Image: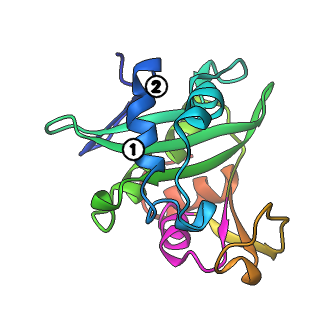
Amino acid sequence: MPVFLETARLALRPFTADDADRLFDLDGDPEVMRYLSGGKPTSRETVRTRVLPRVLHDHPCTGTRGYWAAEEKAGGAFLGWFEFRPVADDIAAVVELGYRLHASAWGKGYATEGARALVDKGFTDLGVDVVTANTMAVNTRSRRVMEKAGLSLLRSFTGEWPEAIEGSEHGEVEYVLTRSDWAQRRVAAGAFKP
């Protein structure tokens, strides 16, 4: 399978139908699903009928998928996935950043490493103007990754949850990074000259 993006430690590749068991295992971990379903695992049927079609979807506006299987370059272990998906299927200008990694991969900088690489690729190669990301307000680890990837808090809000889960009463947060803010930070860091 061709690699979409490499970092120092990660290889991000398109998902295939053969990844169904990996996705089931990932979504079956109560720790991983804590801020998504209150820890309730995703059924195999839901992975087959909803999750797999979503991660296999090609977006015409970018010519890419919106979800990438994340593997360790050293050894090829499946760590989880990254989302870098156009909000509208036919417009690449605004994309949503997301990530879901096995708990064993937490605290090692993988989420930040992958998120930064996707943000850079989006602004340099994919025609992205705005990167957005959302999480529960109480999900401090995910919020920290967003901040380390360069996104800033835009707003706090209360969304509709099909089932309330612990922490949902505190609402959600949206983070954002624009192309101009990204470019200014890169110039300030000496990464490139405009």
Q: Position of residue 60 (x, y in %)?
A: 71, 17
Nearer-N-terminus badge (2/1): 2
Q: Quadrant of the N terminus?
A: top left
- Outermost residue toward the left? 75
Secondary element at tag 2: loop
Label 1 sits on residue: 25
- Residue 141 inside the magenta-drawn segment: yes
Residue at left offset 61%, top offset 30%: 126
Span shown in magenta:
134-150
Q: 25 left or right of 121?
A: left
Label 2 sits on residue: 15
10 Å crowding of disc 2: few (<14), some (14-19), many (20+): many
Secondary element at tag 1: helix
Find residue 156 and report its image quarter.
Answer: bottom right
10 Å crowding of disc 1: few (<14), some (14-19), many (20+): some
Spatial separation of the CA atoms under disc 2 and disc 1: 15 Å
- Check the image and report above or below for 40 versus 43: below
- Check the image and report above or below for 131 versus 87: below
Q: Position of residue 81 (x, y in %)?
A: 45, 42
Find residue 23 and report its image quarter.
Answer: top left
Instruction: Return the residue nearer the eye: 132 or 124.
Output: 132
Q: Nearer the viewer, mark 2 or mark 1?
A: 1
Q: Position of residue 153 (x, y in %)?
A: 69, 73
- Residue 64 inside the magenta-drawn segment: no
- Check the image and report above or below for 183 versus 137: above
Q: 70 left or right of 46?
A: left
Q: Report the amino acid beneath label 2.
A: Phe
Q: 3 left or right of 186?
A: left
Q: Position of residue 10 (x, y in %)?
A: 29, 42
Instruction: Return the residue nearer the eye: 23 or 110.
Output: 23
Residue at left offset 62%, top offset 25%: 53
